[in-house]
């Protein structure tokens, strides 16, 4: 059976060069990086070499990169660690820090903000977005209060691929109040966009390796020097005292290698992926009652997302899988209830339409043949599901 993997925004396979770089640190160079002997020194050297690669990629300093297990942990550390530092500093003042974020953030941001609200450690403003999933710089400005300490806006929305105005928001915050810290979830941007932290104007940036051909279970958080932070995982003094626990050396090596590969081939992959994405979008939009979601121009090269009217996203995924195609849907079945995507509803797409959401996300190995196969299969699947849909009398 033909197999076409178009769910790279969910996860990617480990690159063979990444796996090759990781392999020695499972057996030959297996030491604990906290130990002073040869084995420990080998592990420490590997960690710092990877940190150096990521530092250069982001335009950061060595001590500003903290290795974590994933973007979710990075996001939790960024938000909880910053807010707790303000809580401790203002213990008897009664001041409650204020956070500004958008309504289409990843659940790691939204749930962390909700938790901080529930325990009374922060007040949160959730900004609306337009029909393309684009946050407004003016809305950020209007939401700023004297007690605002953190703005958290994603670089790229993972469901629809819209690129948010991060540079403009960063410039705004530095102009209005440099003491407002700016966090950016750059998970979907690393492969395709400029992630130099000074250009973006961010103080905190989170990422995870499995979105760009490193293994699952490794991420990083950039913390600009001078940003107040309380560690959320107690124990030893690893990662400059901000993330206790024995370092996962093979995975850290894999993350560094994956970043190195991106830096070497970004322009080629961006142009090639964009061309294939446009080919896919053009073909899918030929299907009647189909709409592109996300911004038509301000979008990353690898994500093409749609509303297919009259069909359920989950049903499309099953039939696509039967044909050997992997995709995803913003509509997820939880506890027997089909829940529409919070991103799509924030974009003012009706619940009924949101149930027909479909996302294809391309990767470095996607071919023209893969796209053409999808375009051959999709009209038949949509037609079949529409025939099967119950008729409303």
Image (cartoon, rainbow, N blue to C red):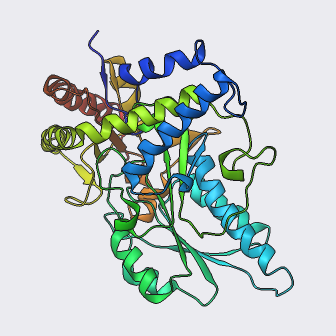
Give the farthest residue toward the right. 92
Residue 57 in the image: x percent, y percent? 37, 49
Q: Nearer the viewer, residue 275 or 169?
A: 169
Indicate the position of residue 92 as horizontal and vertical percent values. 87, 84
> Is 277 situated above or below 340?
above
Residue 370 picture quarter: top left
Q: Which residue lies at the image location 58% right of the left edge and 88% below the top edge?
A: 145
**In the picture provided, is 252 more to the left or to the right than 265?**
right
Q: Is residue 39 left or right of residue 222?
A: right
Up the image or down, 179 lies above or below 4; here it is below
Q: Is residue 63 left or right of residue 246?
A: left
Residue 12 at least partly seen: yes
Residue found farthest to the front: 37
Question: Does residue 314 appear in this view?
Answer: no
Image quadrant where one finds the N terminus: top left
Percent x, y of residue 12: 40, 30
């Amino acid at each position: 059976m033909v197999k076409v993997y178009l769910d790279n925004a969910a996860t990617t396979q480990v690159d063979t060069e990444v796996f090759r770089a990781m392999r020695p640190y499972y057996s030959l160079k297996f030491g604990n990086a906290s130990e002073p002997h040869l084995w420990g020194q080998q592990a420490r050297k590997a960690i710092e070499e990877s940190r150096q690669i990521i530092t250069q990629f982001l335009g950061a300093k060595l001590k500003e990169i903290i290795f974590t297990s994933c973007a979710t942990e990075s996001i939790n550390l960024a938000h909880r660690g910053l807010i707790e530092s303000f809580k401790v500093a203002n213990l008897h003042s009664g001041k409650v820090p204020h956070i500004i974020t958008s309504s289409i953030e990843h659940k790691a941001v939204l749930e962390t903000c909700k938790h901080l609200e529930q325990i009374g450690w922060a007040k949160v403003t959730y900004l609306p977005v337009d029909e393309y999933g684009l946050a407004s710089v003016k809305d950020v400005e209007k939401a700023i209060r004297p007690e605002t300490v953190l703005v958290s806006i994603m670089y790229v929305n993972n469901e629809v691929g819209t690129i948010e105005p991060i540079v403009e928001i960063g410039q705004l915050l530095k102009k209005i109040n440099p003491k407002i810290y700016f966090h950016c979830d750059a998970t979907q941007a690393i492969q395709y966009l400029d992630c130099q932290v000074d250009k973006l104007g961010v103080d905190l940036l989170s990422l995870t390796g499995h979105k760009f051909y490193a293994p699952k279970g490794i991420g990083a958080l950039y913390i600009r020097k001078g940003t107040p932070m309380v560690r959320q995982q107690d124990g030893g003094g690893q990662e400059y005292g901000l993330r206790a626990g024995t370092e996962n050396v093979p995975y850290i090596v894999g993350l560094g290698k994956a970043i190195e590969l991106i830096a070497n081939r970004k322009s080629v992959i961006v142009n090639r992926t964009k061309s294939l994405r446009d080919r896919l979008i053009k073909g899918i939009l030929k299907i009647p009652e189909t709409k592109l979601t996300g911004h038509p121009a301000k979008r990353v090269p690898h994500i093409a997302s749609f509303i297919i009217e009259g069909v359920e996203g989950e049903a499309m995924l099953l039939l696509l899988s039967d044909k050997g195609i992997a995709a995803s849907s913003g509509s997820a079945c939880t506890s027997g209830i089909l829940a529409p995507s919070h991103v799509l509803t924030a974009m003012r797409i009706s619940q009924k339409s949101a149930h027909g959401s479909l996302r294809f996300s391309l990767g470095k190995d996607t071919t023209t043949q893969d796209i053409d196969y999808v375009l051959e299969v999709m009209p038949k699947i949509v037609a079949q599901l529409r025939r099967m849909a119950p008729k409303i009398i």
